[in-house]
Image (tube, rainbow, N blue to C red):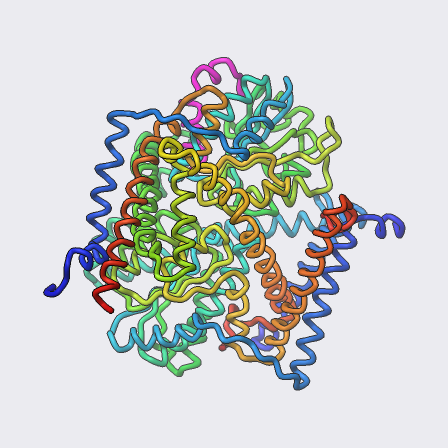
Amino acid sequence: MGVWIILDTKFVALLLLIAAFALFYGYMTLAKGGMKIKARAFPAVAAISEAIGRAAEMGKPVYYSTGMGQGTLNNQLNGPQTLAGISILGYTTRLCAKSGVKITYFTPIADSLPLVEETMRTSYMAEGKPEEFNPAVAINFQNEQSPFLTASLGWIQREKPAASILLGGFYYESVVLGEAGNTIGAMQIGGTANTHQLPFLVATCDYTLIMEELYAASAEISGNPDVLGSLRGEDILKFFVLILLGLGFILALVNNNSLISLLKV
Amino acid sequence: MSQIYKREMVFIVTGVVALVMMLDYFFGKNIPGISGAGNISSTLQTWALIIQLMAIGLGAINLIQVHYRQISRKTNMAVYSAWFMGFFALLLLLGFYKLATGVELYPYTWIFKNVYVSLGTTLYAITGFYIFSAAYRAFRARNIDAAILLIGGIFVLLANAPIGEVIWGGFPLIGNWFNNVGQVPGMRTFTVVGALGLLAFGFRALIGKERGFYSEVQ
Amino acid sequence: MSGQNIWDKLQNVDRRVFYWILFVALTVPFLSPIGLPITITPSSQAFYDGIKTIEKGEVVVLSINSGVSAWGDCLPAMVASVHKVYDQGGKLIVWSIGYTDVDITWAKIKEKLPDVFSKWKEGEDYVYFGYSPPQETNVALLRDNIRAIYPKDVRGVATDQIPLMKDINGANKIKFVLSSDTGDAQMYYVRQWKNGPVNYEKTEKPPTVAELGIAMNKSGDMAYFLSGDLFGLVAGSRGAAELEALTGYKGDATITMDSISVSHILLVLAIILTNISMFATRGNKK
């Protein structure tokens, strides 16, 4: 078994994964120990408080959604996006509770409901307003995209929210919700790691979190130095990836596929 | 369960499941008892499916709660909530009838085929109209970047439509280049950086540093 | 408003005006088809070349991971593909990863292909399993043990009793997967089947995957097609129309091409108009 492990290319992938984790952990430890980590501020995150302020002035609610997300949290690509969206929902709900703004959360992901209700309830409790939390603010549509979209469009047309926050795993509903928000003049903040929906969110939203920014935003919001350390580790990892890409490009020019074979999973 | 152990239990369960799934993925069938049908990893995967299916029931309860509140408080949306509850009950009964007897009644099929299918297709078609208005607003040459986007967009649009090659043979040539070569490095970059961000997020969640989504205040 | 000239008004046209113009313009080609020729893109050609390699008796999976709302983009491609599989003498296993309305989609495919399904026998030439939950773990389980997810087909016949499934219980007996997606299910098959531990017995190579998806997926999936993870990519109505032209079975997608031409031309004209008005008003604002 020992020889087999070394020769199996998945072992290379495991080594790289462990190295990446070690890098993240290393920088998190350094940051916790006092190393200063400067992280670029995300305009979209700063805009959340601006959007809540706008809603408070106008006396209008806030619309929040984490998108279709393939209808489940148990999804490799969309589950983490939904969780990142829920993280930011906690922060947004807290701001709303502080400002007295009503926030309504729409989702077609049934298995996210307990997390969402708990997150929102905790945010209201943190602001000392547990009685203002209403479980009806989290509305689920049974893993169905069309009912979710119809209900969202109807709600947006009736309630005319001052801000629409779309952060999570979106599919074709991104352009529909984005345009619906534009129609009523809402301030829109969007973000997804689904590449095929990025253009629509960028075109329809005032502020966008693109790809990894969605995951990093919750780190920025928390402000914990060790969490910010993982962002530094991620950036260092990007340099290694760039070096690998350059190496692969040069090797490919001389028809050498050894790097491809080594990294193939 | 004591509140003190609530967070620790999440970490322990997440950690154990992650370890098993990683062992399954990286070492395949070479570790007895982990991989393959009937072993730990497939059992955990089956449990995940079951939990997700249970959540559908939870979602139904949430829907009933939300609409019942509308009806009981006699809000201006109460009529629509009553309409929803009526159809919910009807389809639930028809579904249970089919489960019990194996016979699918005509109203059940009719509602699904003629209402649900039609509405779903309509919703998807709305996307086209919304893309039209979004493109009308977004494709303005306010600066050099926007101008390049505009020109590229026009080539791609006309490459996708048969009329483009009737107007000029260069449209499909250049437009398909944008589709097949031009935008690919950008998409690959997005995919790679998205994966790295996901890796960091997953690591933070695994070691319990990413707490925003299970009721820790940020 | 006072002081607004035609160029200012053009920039702020109510979007409902566009929606009405588009609606009317889109109906014209349906009433009076134009029938413009289309060129075939490499990704559609590669898909067609791939399904042409099906030999008599080889089994292919059609994974319907798109709902009824995506029929416009995905259904014509599925219909053309199933017809070609039949022409090649192949066999078909059909299931869905996560779409509850798959029964209607499959019924529609059968309705569109009466000549195929009058000759094909269910259980021997094709089998339809129906819905399973929308998870990658599901696809991984199907790779190793189909019976774990589908102990019986939609007719209630035990999988063990189905002649087509007699020797088939996983990816090792399946040539390739045709995944019709509105989401990312094709990547589940790429990760779990193509890059998984099981090879197709006949070729000793991993079972390959092709995508029959919506147009929105094309930009993201193109990278996977170019890297060889997908052997073919048929995206949107345009891809479906190309596939119909290649297979020779003109269907809904070919009819839709005229409407696509009209809508795209309208959009280009609208964009040109708004840019002209923007430049015209820019001079005034200065």
x then y, percent, for residue A133: 36, 73
Answer with the quarter of the image where residue C281 lies: bottom left
Question: Which quarter of the rendering shows the N terminus of chain C?
Answer: bottom left
- Residue visible at 53% across and 42% down in the picture: B180
* Side of C281 where B191 appears, left or right: right
- Residue visible at 34% across and 51% down in the picture: B135
- Residue visible at 47% across and 50% down in the picture: A196
Range of residues picked out in magenta: C101-122
Which residue of the protein is positioned furthest toward the left in this rendering?
Answer: C2
- Residue visible at 51% across and 58% down in the picture: A193
Q: Is residue A218 or residue B57 the one in the foreground? A: A218
- In the image, residue C94 sits, relative to residue A149, either above or below, namely above
| Residue B37 visible | yes
Which residue of the protein is positioned furthest toward the bottom in this rendering?
Answer: A34
Q: Is residue C281 or residue A70 the one in the foreground? A: C281
Asked if residue C111 lies in the magenta stretch, the reply is yes
Q: Is residue B164 or residue A76 the one in the foreground? A: B164
Q: Main secondary structure of the magenta part?
A: helix
Q: Is residue A20 or residue B43 the one in the foreground? A: A20
| Residue A138 visible | no
x then y, percent, for residue B93: 35, 41
